[in-house]
Amino acid sequence: MKFYQGSLPPLVWNPKFGKVTMIFVDGVYETKDAVEKEILTRVGYRHDPKSVPLHVEIKPIEVSIKPVKKVIPTKSKMLRKKSKKR
């Protein structure tokens, strides 16, 4: 089943695993996993009108969406060695 990002963030964080579990590439994420389908449907991502298996029993987990921050690499500063005074 295909899910579409729309205006939602491209990464879906799963606190149960402590990491990003789903990443949208070019605004689309495709999965066959029933648990992932249920999570993405609950969070509110748009999807194809194919049937979502709502009969799957899963334990409730918290899913949070965190915005992506772009990290710009900085130049490292060169440090001088301290000279020993005699």
Image (spheres, rainbow, N blue to C red):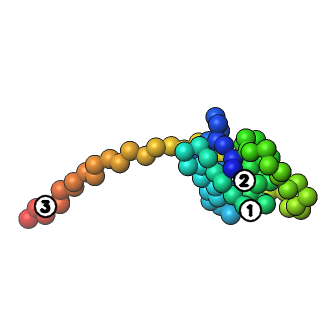
Q: Which residue is mark 3?
A: 83
Amino acid type, mark 3:
Ser
Closer to the camera in the image, 68 or 78: 68
Q: Is residue 63 visible in this depiction of the protein?
A: no
Q: Marks 3 and 2: which is nearer the front?
A: 2
First-in-chain label (1 vs 3):
1
Which of the two labelled residues, at mark 2 and mark 1, occupies the earlier sequence position?
Answer: 2
Q: Which residue is mark 1?
A: 33
Residue positioned 55% across, 49% down in the render? 25
Badge number at residue 18: none
Percent of width and height locating residue 17? 68, 63
Residue 14 rendering spot, x and y as whole percentages: 69, 56
* Left or right of residue 65: residue 61: right
Image position of 9 (left or right of 45):
left
**Amino acid under disc 1:** Asp
Q: Is residue 48 visible?
A: yes
Tags 2 and 1 touching, CB below 8 Å: no
> Which structural element holds mark 1?
loop
Mark 2 highlights which residue?
1
Q: Position of residue 70 (x, y in %)?
A: 46, 43
**Kind of residue at disc 2:** Met
- Could you tell me how far apart the alpha carbons at marks 3 and 2 are, in whole angstroms? 65 Å
In front: label 1 or label 3: 1
**Cα–Cα span, label 1 and label 3:** 62 Å
Residue at 74% from the left image edge and 62% from the top image edge: 33
Q: In this orientation, which residue lies closer to the viewer: 14 or 47?
A: 47
User: Which marked residue is nearer to the observer: mark 2 or mark 1?
Assistant: 2
Among all residues in the image, which is located at the extreme front?
A: 50
Name which residue lies at 22% across and 55% down. Answer: 79
Question: Within 10 angstroms of label 2, few (less than 14), some, or many (20 or more) residues?
Answer: some
Contact between labelled residues 3 and 1, with CB atoms less than 8 Å apart: no
Q: Residue furthest top?
A: 7
